Image (cartoon, rainbow, N blue to C red):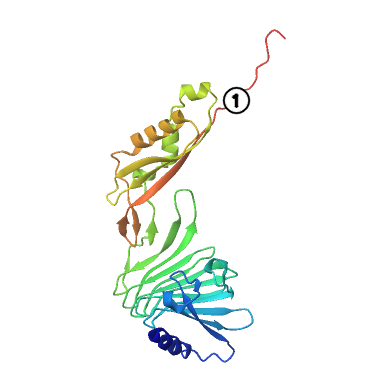
Amino acid sequence: MKVFITLVLLLSCIYTNSYAQRDTLALDAYLNVLPNFSEAYFIGIKTQLDKKHTQLNAYTLDGILSRAITYSKFSDLYRDRKLDGRCVWCYESGEDSLVMHFSKDKYVGYDTVYYKNGGVMFIKKQDKTTRFRQFWPNGQLKRDQKLVRRNQYGDVYSGKCFDEAGNEVEFTPYESLPQYPGGISLQRLISQNLNYPYGAQLRNKMGVAIVRFLIDVDGQCIEYKIVRSSGDKLLDDEVLRVATKMTKGKCFIPAKIDDVPIRASIAIPINFVIEKQPAQDSPFL
């Protein structure tokens, strides 16, 4: 208990905000307030910044800052709080790792990620253009991109890339989705090769089936699965058959993050609809 008391007294002296009332709290790993310090995962310093905003700084039991979160509504339970303002997540050593901004509990689309040495790694401003800037550890600009348009096949970006010496190199977006060889629409390809099962037609069965499969880092397709059933096994089986036939053995361009291939999934919805034939006039009328 002496260790906890000493830590609480130490943390209570960290801030000199002239406005505020400060409370020292015991917190669990999710920043919920606990009834006693013996069970604490974090020690929290709650500071009333102004009439509308409360800041909660969460420290490890070693006294290292882990998070600094600003709220417009504070409650003992994390789920009942409202984020509003600058929110900081820290490395284990206490340096800023991620800074995000919220307004009335909504993300306002501006954040910064830092290297452990304090240098900026990313700056992202999410508006109509979604501006994204990435930096090398030496501070040199690595990538400057903005969103051009969105479509069903993935976001399209434009921008510039640079090496560590500042020389411009070929532009590649920070994130990219898997692509079918030749850039063909996979959904359209599967739809065009489907056979509407006759048994399902006789029973007037319609619906949407969603098939999902993984694209491995080498571009190969694995782990096919119907993740949403159309409600009819014949329809689901046909989607699975054609999706497997159209992709098995094909070498996709894998998804990438920062030019590094990663495993990613693709989910494709296929809609089965029986078109009604127009009524024809009887020749006997």
Q: Quadrant of residue 174?
A: bottom left
Residue at the farthest right position? 285
Camera-nearest residue between 67 and 276: 67
Camera-nearest residue between 273 and 140: 273
Classify 262 as above or below 91. above
* Residue 40 appears in the figure: no
- Judging by the rendered image, the residue that carries numbered circle 1 is 276
Residue at 38% x, 49% y is 265
- Tell me: 219 left or right of 63: left
Residue at 44% x, 28% y is 234
* Residue 234 appears in the figure: yes
- Tell me: 259 left or right of 19: left
Tell me the element at label 1. Answer: loop
Dot 1 alpha-carbon crowd within 10 angstroms: few under 14, some 14 to 19, many 20 or more: few
Camera-nearest residue between 85 and 156: 85
Classify 66 as above or below 264. below
Q: Position of residue 135 (x, y in %)?
A: 36, 73
